[in-house]
Amino acid sequence: MSNQVPTNIITGFLGVGKTTTILNLLKSKPENENWAVLVNEFGEVGIDGAMMAEGGALIKEVPGGCMCCTAGVPMSVGINVLLRQKPDRLIIEPTGLGHPKQVIKTLTSAQYTDYIDLKATIALVDPRNLSDERHLSNANFNDQLSVAEVVIGNKVDQCTAEDVDVFNDWVTDQVPAKIFHKLVKNGVLPIEVLDIERRAQETESSTHSHDFHDHSDLEPVFELAPEKPFIRRENQGQGYFSCGWIIGAEHIFDFDQLFSMFSDLNAERIKAVVNTDKGCYAFNVANRVVSVNQMSLEGYESRIEVIDSELLPWEQLETVLLRLCGLR
């Protein structure tokens, strides 16, 4: 490669709308450009890659936790695979429980000096979370905001005037000052934000301790045997638990019942791409608000991931899910 690839990190805590934002950016990218997206998920079954499959980008997933652990090998391998395809831009979406300082450290290392032009890091935040002690006391939440040159207050349409004031006061108090900030809804950003230059920073080594994840491969490879039409995978770390299911494409969920179940389930985060009696849909649940988007992924297995700070009764949830697709 003769030219550095403009690269952005888009970070933010669970449920803030990172995937929706990236999908919107992909819709507005120049038609003659090929973009690549490296997606890291806390869960094991890989939902975001499926959601982005229709966005016209090169997608690579690092599932199962923080992609910067194990000496950065999973992240580096994923980046290298995408760079070989010579994209015009690279977007990296770390997990909502990830450590952006380690990602920045890797991208600015000698390994990538000739290949990556790291632009400003963009952090998304739900302004309502700036008044929530659970978020304010979370080291990852604070790190994601502090390391970013650009801060986007997303979901402003769901905020009160007080939430907006808290966001504006918070941005005003930042030292050093943020280069750019904006309140938006539905993750709609001006594409020009991606070209904001990164502020020169001293290289810092992260003091965070990571839970160890053995990434034997970058993407989960699951064989759905005829006698076992679904599989379940669990993960835990950093005070959170996840459970994910992959269910064969031939098993169809009742859309209305699934929507109702997701609405009633008291979990911090739910993502799913599911075959239903109304078609294939992506479900995105945060703060018990369910949003859906129709997909055109024919023959793709249904994938469901639930994340919470409490260990949920996975067996009971599995029984309900299997009942909704006729497996129980």
Image (cartoon, rainbow, N blue to C red):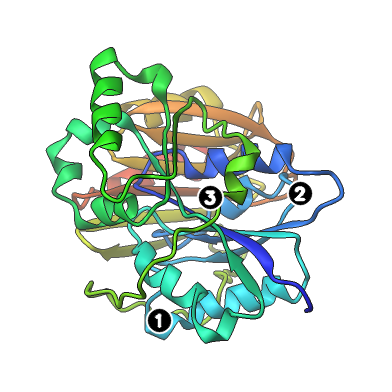
Amino acid at circle 1: Asp
Q: How many angstroms separate mark 2 from mark 3 (CA)?
A: 21 Å
Residue hosting label 3: 303
Q: Nearer the viewer, residue 317 or 217?
A: 217
CB-based contact (under 8 Å), mark 2 and mark 3: no
* Secondary structure type for disc 1: loop
Amino acid at circle 3: Arg
Residue 103 on image: x %, y %:
43, 69
Residue hosting label 1: 214
Above or below, 302 against 79 in this view is above
Q: Nearer the viewer, residue 89 or 84?
A: 89
* Secondary structure type for disc 2: loop
Kindly indicate the quadrant of the structure image that contains residue 238. bottom left
Residue that lies at the very extreme toward the right in this rendered image: 32
Residue 147 on image: x %, y %:
35, 57
Q: Quadrant of the C terminus?
A: top left
Mark sitting on residue 56: 2
CB-based contact (under 8 Å), mark 2 and mark 1: no
Q: Nearer the viewer, residue 207 or 42?
A: 207
Q: How many angstroms separate mark 1 from mark 3 (CA)?
A: 22 Å
Q: Is any part of residue 266 visible from this angle?
A: no
Amino acid at circle 2: Gly
Residue in the image at 64% along x and 78% along y: 80
Question: Label 3: few (<14), some or many (≥20) within 10 Å?
Answer: many
Q: How many angstroms separate mark 2 from mark 1 (CA)?
A: 30 Å
